[in-house]
Image (cartoon, rainbow, N blue to C red):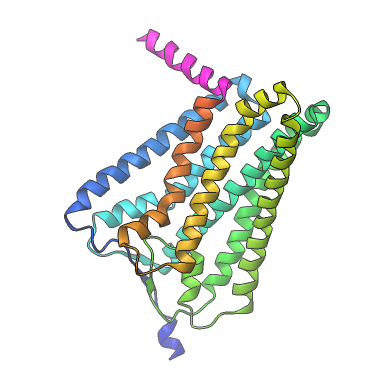
């Protein structure tokens, strides 16, 4: 019997069974959404790289946040677009693990980068005298390196433990793969497959607590002066809005996975599942691009120069 369950190589995805005549329309809208994600994120990335005035910690972290958005959405949109035009929604076991790895590591990197951005604002506003000694170029490079390395490593370990499980099923009740759903169709749950995700969740809950602590100090400091309130509105508000958006979208997805109900329509369940790979990748660069004066001015100047050239 164990030999039979170990040969499962293809998994089926659910959620697209009722699209019927809307298949082409959904494909066009999804492709448009993906193109917008690329446009707004690449705009911020190129702007930060080209404009030397933006080579500061906050903008470097923002640039990496946009790079991570492209990385994370690449794990979902190409496969989803293919499924929209197909009548069979299947994925290989290896492809499922890879998709889960990309989506999980992107989420974790997002949280790490948001924590770095919160720390940067905390030091800039609450400890301005030591800002330039704390946020040096060398330290910023180390922070960014760790913000990528640690999530990739932790999620890689989680994916390896998931891949070692034998499968007793082949149905993933979602339009994309995540490790937790793969572990649900495993024949047995190993200690590692429980301990590793538990450690990862605890580690990133620590990130959320750190961000909360940073903002509590930021708000307390900014309330004491008009200048502090102005600085908070100009530099911290976009980050705070992006953080709240990220948290709400991820919370909806977690609630969907843990407490998904048959009372909800398939379209509502799908919307809850894809919020975090639709809203933040578009909202984050738009929010920073429109609200941060330096970024907005740099983009405007670049566009005007190119218009006048033609």
Q: Quadrant of residue 266?
A: bottom left
Query: Main structural element of the magenta stretch: helix, strand or loop?
Result: helix
Magenta highlight on residue 300 = yes
Whether residue 216 is visible to the viewer of this picture, yes or no, is yes
Tell me: residue 140, above or below residue 274.
above
Q: Could you tell me residue 205's position as x and y percent?
A: 66, 57
Tell me: residue 134, above or below residue 307.
below
Report the front residue among 243 and 285: 243
The structure residue drawn at horizontal position 75% and vertical position 37%, both measured from the top left corner, is: 139
Q: Quadrant of residue 63?
A: top right
Tell me: residue 309, above or below residue 199.
above
Question: Is 259 left or right of 243, judged from the image as shown?
Answer: left
Q: Residue lying at the far left in this picture: please name it.
A: 21
> Quarter of the image containing the C terminus?
top left
> Quarter of the image containing the N terminus?
bottom left
Q: Could you tell me residue 160's position as x and y percent?
A: 57, 68
The structure residue drawn at horizontal position 47% and vertical position 56%, both measured from the top left corner, is: 252
Q: Which residues are magenta?
A: 292-310
Magenta highlight on residue 43 = no
Whether residue 46 is visible to the viewer of this picture, yes or no, is no
Q: Could you tell me residue 110's position as x and y percent?
A: 57, 46
Q: Quadrant of residue 30?
A: top left
Report the front residue among 215 and 144: 215
The structure residue drawn at horizontal position 73% and vertical position 46%, both measured from the top left corner, is: 213
Tell me: residue 295, above or below residue 215.
above
């Amino acid at each position: 019997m164990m030999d039979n369950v170990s040969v499962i190589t293809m998994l089926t995805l659910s959620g697209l069974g009722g699209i019927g005549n809307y298949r082409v329309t959904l494909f066009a809208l999804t492709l448009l959404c993906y193109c917008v994600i690329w446009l707004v994120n690449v705009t911020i990335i190129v702007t930060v790289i080209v404009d030397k005035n933006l080579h500061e910690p906050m903008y470097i972290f923002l640039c990496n946040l946009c790079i991570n958005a492209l990385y994370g959405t690449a794990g979902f949109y190409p496969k989803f677009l293919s499924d929209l035009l197909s009548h069979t929604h299947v994925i290989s076991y290896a492809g499922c693990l890879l998709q889960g790895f990309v989506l999980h590591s992107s989420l974790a990197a997002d949280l790490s980068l948001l924590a770095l951005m919160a720390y940067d604002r905390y030091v800039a506003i609450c400890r301005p005298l030591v800002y330039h000694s704390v946020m040096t170029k060398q330290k910023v490079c180390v922070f960014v390196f760790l913000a990528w390395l640690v999530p990739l490593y932790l999620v890689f370990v989680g994916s390896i433990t998931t891949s070692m499980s034998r499968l007793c099923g082949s149905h993933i009740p979602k339009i994309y793969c995540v490790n937790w759903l793969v572990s649900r169709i495993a024949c047995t749950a190993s200690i590692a497959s429980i301990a590793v995700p538990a450690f990862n969740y605890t580690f990133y809950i620590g990130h959320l607590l750190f961000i909360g602590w940073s903002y509590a100090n930021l708000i307390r400091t900014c309330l004491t002066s008009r200048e502090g309130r102005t600085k908070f509105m100009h530099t911290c508000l976009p980050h705070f809005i992006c953080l709240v958006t990220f948290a709400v979208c991820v919370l909806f997805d977690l609630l969907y996975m843990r407490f998904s109900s048959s009372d909800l329509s398939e379209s509502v369940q799908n919307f809850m599942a894809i919020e975090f790979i639709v809203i933040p990748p578009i909202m984050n660069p738009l929010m920073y691009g429109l609200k941060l004066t330096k970024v907005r001015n740099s983009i405007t100047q670049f566009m005007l120069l190119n218009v006048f050239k033609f």
